[in-house]
């Protein structure tokens, strides 16, 4: 009785020390987090939107295309000409012959009315499409940042759970050794606990490797050094909100998704080019004026009068069968292609919305199940197993299994929470706005 009572006392003391060590380790992690700069989700998104070079490239392209409509609507530059006509080569005299003159002229090409407006309209539609592409890229960038950030958060929590279980298993090893020393335990209990510790160490290495890879991905998205350290907050709001209906989400995606707006503008630009190709059946014009300066005198002694000329020309679309007709067919086919792309894009958006919604609801339900039912029950099982082990009613293997099961459930909870938030990020990007909750 003395040894049994003493053993129970020692076991209780060791477990209390184990929990104290866990609490101390967590406090140490929190204090180190406070000392370093913590990267919140909002800050990561803001830094990526500010510095990501891929986004900057698309923004520069949108700015460049925004300058095209005014250029397309402007008339071609006029032409200035300077000519010397009928200069006698024997004397190179400007006054010898009456027809010798120095001409200064100006001419202007005039596209058929409506052509410039159609060119400008097509350029404006392409510019608006580029602006929508920029908005789409922002959505994708935010989605990617959130996805990687939540991966990192899950891996941090997984490392935390592993560390907590390592401390407890070390105490179990000490308990098993004590029981073995007093003749109440088996050596296989010690070996089993040491094996579980080794497996946790292997899990730590694998999770740390995954975390390092995710850190590189997030640093690249924020345009930081790939080797920069990233420290996330130790806790976040774990609330998972309820979504609006699938019908409402699809309607909002159809109205708000930038990729659909961009493709609609491209289809409009293709339609404008069809109209422009049809306008090419009409001729373009060119007008001009020339002033001819003459030197010398007439036979009667009077000064020679200067000449003035007015010019008008137009192109003749005589080969419409091989040029204009083919151009109209080409532009019509391009318009049809853009129309089919819009239809395909609508289908893909609808699919993205539906899949992200399904993933969010599944992960949310799974996270709530772990948090509200499975993990509390698993903890009660560990406590019951531990109490039974203290009095010799439960073997060491079942105690280890119950603790390992709890560790797996806690890790799966953080995985489900991360998956739900990642699905939420995908859903916001698929819909095109953050107004997706009831």
Image (spheres, rainbow, N blue to C red):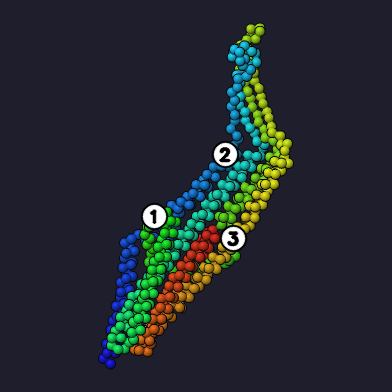
User: Residue 415: percent from the left, percent from the top?
Assistant: 45, 70
From where the camera sits, is residue 117 visible?
yes
From the image, tell me which residue sits under label 2.
Answer: 71
Q: Do tag 2 and tag 1 residues touch (Cβ < 8 Å)?
A: no
Q: Residue at x 45, y 62 (%)?
A: 148
Mark 2 or 3, closer to the camera: 3
Q: Secondary structure at mark 2?
A: helix
Mark 3–mark 1 Cα distance, whole angstroms, equals 35 Å
Q: Position of residue 6 (x, y in %)?
A: 27, 87
Front position in the image: 250 or 340: 340
Q: Of helix, strand and loop, which one carries label 1?
A: loop
Q: Residue at x 46, y 51 (%)?
A: 53
| In this view, the mark in front (2 or 1) | 1
Tag 2 and tag 3, C-beta contact below 8 Å? no
Which is nearer the eye, 295 or 100? Answer: 100
Q: In the displayed image of the protein, which residue is found farthest to the bottom?
A: 1
Which residue, given by chain and number where applicable, does mark 3 sit on? 348
> In this rendering, which labeled residue sits more in front, label 3 or label 1?
1
Does residue 317 appear to the left or right of 174 in the view shown? right
Instruction: Work out whether 298 lies above or below 153.
Output: above
How would you rate the neighbour count of disc 1 (Cα within 10 Å): few for under 14, some for 14-19, many for 20 or more? few
Distance of label 2 from label 1 (alpha carbons): 41 Å
Residue that badge 1 annotates: 225
Position of 135 compared to 162: left or right? right
Q: Is residue 5 visible?
A: no
The secondary structure type at the circle numbered 3 is helix
Task: Estimate the x, y position of residue 130 in percent, counting from the top left.
Answer: 55, 49
């Amino acid at each position: 009785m003395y040894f049994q009572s003493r053993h129970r006392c020692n076991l209780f003391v060791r477990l209390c020390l184990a929990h104290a060590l866990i609490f101390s380790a967590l406090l140490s992690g929190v204090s180190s987090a406070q000392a370093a700069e913590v990267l919140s989700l909002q800050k990561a998104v803001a830094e990526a939107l500010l510095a990501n070079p891929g986004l900057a490239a698309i923004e520069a392209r949108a700015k460049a295309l925004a300058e095209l409509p005014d250029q397309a609507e402007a008339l071609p530059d006029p032409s200035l000409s300077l000519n010397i006509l009928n200069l006698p080569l024997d004397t190179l005299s400007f006054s010898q012959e009456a027809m010798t003159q120095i001409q200064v002229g100006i001419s202007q090409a005039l596209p058929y009315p409506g052509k410039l407006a159609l060119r400008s309209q097509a350029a404006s539609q392409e510019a608006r499409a580029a602006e929508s592409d920029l908005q789409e890229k922002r959505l994708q960038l935010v989605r990617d940042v959130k996805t990687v950030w939540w991966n990192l958060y899950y891996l941090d929590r997984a490392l935390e759970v592993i560390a907590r279980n390592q401390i407890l298993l070390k105490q179990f090893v000490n308990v098993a050794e004590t029981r073995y020393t007093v003749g109440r335990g088996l050596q296989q209990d010690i070996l089993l606990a040491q094996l579980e510790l080794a497996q946790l160490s292997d899990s730590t290495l694998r999770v740390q490797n995954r975390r390092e890879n995710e850190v590189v991905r997030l640093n690249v998205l924020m345009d930081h050094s790939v080797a920069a350290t990233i420290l996330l907050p130790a806790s976040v709001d774990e609330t998972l909100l309820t979504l609006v209906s699938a019908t409402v989400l699809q309607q909002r995606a159809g109205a708000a998704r930038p990729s659909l707006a961009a493709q609609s503008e491209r289809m409009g630009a293709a339609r404008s080019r069809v109209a422009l190709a049809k306008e090419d059946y009409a001729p373009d014009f060119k007008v001009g004026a020339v002033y001819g300066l003459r030197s010398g005198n007439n036979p009667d002694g009077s000064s020679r009068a200067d000449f003035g000329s007015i010019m008008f020309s137009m192109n003749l679309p005589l080969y419409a069968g091989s040029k204009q007709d083919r151009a109209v067919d080409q532009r019509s086919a391009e318009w049809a292609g853009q129309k089919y792309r819009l239809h395909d894009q609508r289908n893909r958006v609808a699919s993205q919305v539906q899949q992200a919604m399904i993933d969010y609801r599944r992960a949310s339900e799974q996270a709530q199940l772990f948090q509200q039912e499975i993990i509390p029950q698993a903890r009660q099982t560990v406590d019951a197993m531990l109490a039974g082990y203290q009095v010799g009613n439960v073997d060491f293997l079942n105690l280890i299994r119950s603790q390992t099961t709890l560790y797996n459930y806690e890790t799966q909870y953080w995985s489900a929470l991360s998956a739900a938030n990642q699905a939420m990020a995908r859903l916001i990007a698929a819909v095109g706005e953050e107004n997706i909750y009831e």
